[in-house]
Image (cartoon, grey):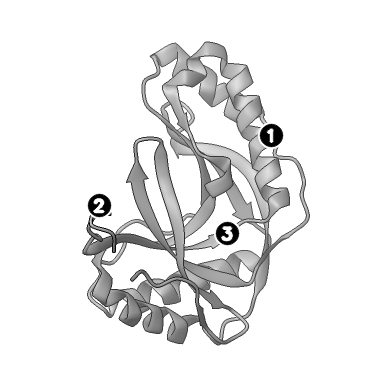
Amino acid sequence: MHPSDPAPTSTWRLFVAVKLSPAALASLSTVAATLRQGMGGASRGVSWANLEHLHVTLKFLGEVSREATPLIQAQIAAATRDLPAFRLVLQGAGCFPSLANPRVVWVGLGGDPGLRALQTLQQVTEYALVALGFAPEQRPFQPHITLGRVNQLRAPEKRALGEAIKKVSVPATPPISIAVVYLMRSELKPGGALYTVVAQFPLEGGYREIHQSV
């Protein structure tokens, strides 16, 4: 390490996720652009997601000691290696907690039996990591992709966003193939989060480490 290089961090901010296809990302980009256009200048009151980094989070781990990552990887590999790959489809837009008071704008996921397979994948991942001492998720798993988070909107602007969400249509795309689970690192930067793949876990079986910091 060069004397001027910053000291490596002792913890990593980690989460487990599956990624989306380029076609799905293009469809989500269209939905986000339609909503922004419908809101006009008020869209500045929403923090829109970086569409290149959209994913479906299965388990958020938070700040974790770097030394613990090999055990986490082994646990995820053991939990997922016998699960089959599956396919999902984008299915409608909505918001949490309600259309009258939107705080999180999302696009849903569906397509049985793929949706059931996604729920099973999330459950086995959750159980595997809770066994290592990570806190269990208190909220039920609701498969979705977050497009934006409301920061500052007045009541009329919130109503306008809710109406726009009701009217927006999600362009049809080919089914999204989910064949790999990712352990991801998130670094919070001034310009937004930076995501790094730590390891990947093919659902057809096997395991290949992608990145291990030195």
Residue placed under numbered mark 2 in the picture: 4
Measured as percent of width and height from the top left, residue 70 is found at 34, 80
Report which quarter residue 127 is drawn in.
Answer: bottom left
Q: CA distance from mark 1 to mark 3?
A: 18 Å
Measured as percent of width and height from the top left, residue 42 is found at 49, 15
Type of residue at label 3?
Answer: Lys
168 vs 119, left or right, is right
Q: Is residue 22 above or below residue 80?
A: above
Q: Quadrant of the C terminus?
A: bottom left
Q: Nearer the viewer, residue 194 or 55?
A: 194
Type of residue at label 1?
Answer: Thr
For the residues bearing labels 1 and 2, Cβ distance under 8 angstroms: no
Q: Is residue 198 above or below residue 173?
A: below
Between tags 1 and 2, which lies in front?
Answer: 2
What residue lies at 38% left-to-right and 54% top-to-bottom?
A: 186
Task: Choose the circle earlier in sequence order: 1 or 2.
Answer: 2
Task: Choose the circle earlier in sequence order: 2 or 3.
Answer: 2
Measured as percent of width and height from the top left, residue 19 is found at 57, 59
Q: Secondary structure at mark 3?
A: strand
What residue lies at 47% left-to-right and 54% top-to-bottom?
A: 142
Q: Secondary structure at mark 2?
A: loop
Residue placed under numbered mark 1 in the picture: 30
Q: Residues within 10 Å of mark 1 (few under 14, many from 20)?
A: some
